[in-house]
Image (tube, coloured by chain):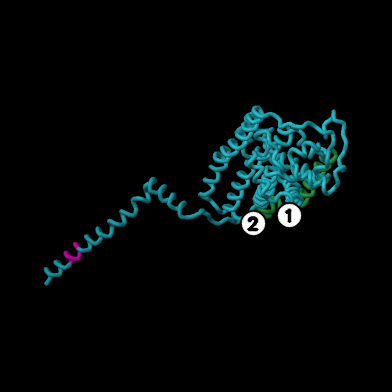
Amino acid sequence: MASFARYLRFVAGIAAFFLMIALSVPAAAQQSPQVDPTARAVHEQQLLKEFDRIQGRVTIPDTRSGVLEQPAGRDWRYFRNVTLRWIGGIAILGMLAVLVIFYLMRGMVRIASGRSGRTIVRFSGFERFVHWMTATCFIILAISGLNITFGRPLLLPLIGHDAFSAWSQWAKYAHNYLSFPFTIGVILIFLMWIGGNIPNKVDVEWLKAGGGIVGDSHPPAYRFNAGQKAVYWIVVIGGGAVAVTGYQLMFPFYVTNIEGMQLAQIVHAVVGVLFIAVMLAHIYIGTIGMEGAFEAMGEGTVDLNWAKEHHSLWLEEERARMGANKTHHQPSSTPAE
Amino acid sequence: MKVFLLACSCAVVIALVAVGGLSIVQEPVSVAFSTSAVRL
């Protein structure tokens, strides 16, 4: 009997030994990756892929500061530091190159029949006021906005940290505060000129003829031709887009979260640099690109022959509305401005 | 030229109004991102 009891203890001891080994094998298998730094790094990457943020708890009132990591922020930072600079550089420098080449090939578009010495009112004082308020704000917004994207790599090495810091601070103030008159200007432009900027069949013919810029023809147009209508809608839609996204950034977390603000910054920046490129073309054609064009916004009047060549249908409408003699005589030796 | 100067002046005036408006609407950093126990 005693030998049987010893036999049972021996069997139980063997069973316990194998059971301990059997249980310890998976435990060892689970523990080994935890001490493997490579495996831990892989585990963190999986964690970042599965969650849009890693956050904890903080004791200060701003609970959003508890976000430790937001993986999408890396993509946004890459866009801001690399992709955006390529988009902006290509768009703006590309447009400048095109304009220089075009000017060298085509030169200024002259008034083919010469100046008549008689002018007609093109834009009222209020229209020019709104245009210049929006335009001056846009130029400052563009320069201060480009400083945010290109200032660090281009301007900082030239002027040093102190000057760049002071300049950037004032540029940021200007960018924020002048956005308000710019937005008001865009709204007024939308309301003021919407009537003349609805696309129609005349625009198709104008485009087919190259707008008179390419070639020597002068396709008919009402008050705004297809090119001007394109600029109008770019200003309204683009200006609206940069205003909405800009105010999202000016009032952080009022409307959206960090992902929304990153998206807003991307839209704001891309639309902004494309907007600048388009406005360079607008400035070109309104100044050195076309004789007599600047006078429309400068003094509000244009030469009758300019109006005949570029906006013949509008001139007919104006004459029918006001009478053919409602024009102003000017000495032929001086420009219409 | 008068219209241009008037437009620039008006933009500055609106911007100054915005300065006053934003200073009322937006909280300073010391209020928004800390407690009274924090010295900034």
> Badge 2 is on which residue?
A255
Q: Colour of chain B?
A: green
Mark 2 to mark 1 CA distance (whole Å): 14 Å
What is the number of callouts on the image?
Answer: 2
Q: Are marks 2 and 1 in contact (CB under 8 Å)?
A: no
Eyeballing the image, is A310 above or below A263?
above
Q: Position of residue A191 (x, y in %)?
A: 75, 52
Q: Residues within 10 Å of mark 2 (few under 14, many from 20)?
A: few
Q: Quadrant of residue A146?
A: top right
Q: Chain of mark 1?
A: B
Give the secondary structure at mark 2: loop
Amino acid type, label 2: Val
Eyeballing the image, is A237 above or below A217?
below
Q: Quadrant of residue A208?
A: top right
Residue A125 appears left or right of A176: right
> Badge 1 is on which residue?
B25
Viewer-nearest residue: A75 or A228: A228
Instruction: Tell me, for residue A273, which label it has, or none.
Output: none
Q: Position of residue A284 (x, y in %)?
A: 70, 34
Residue extent of the magenta highlight: A9-14
Q: Residues within 10 Å of mark 1 (few under 14, many from 20)?
A: few
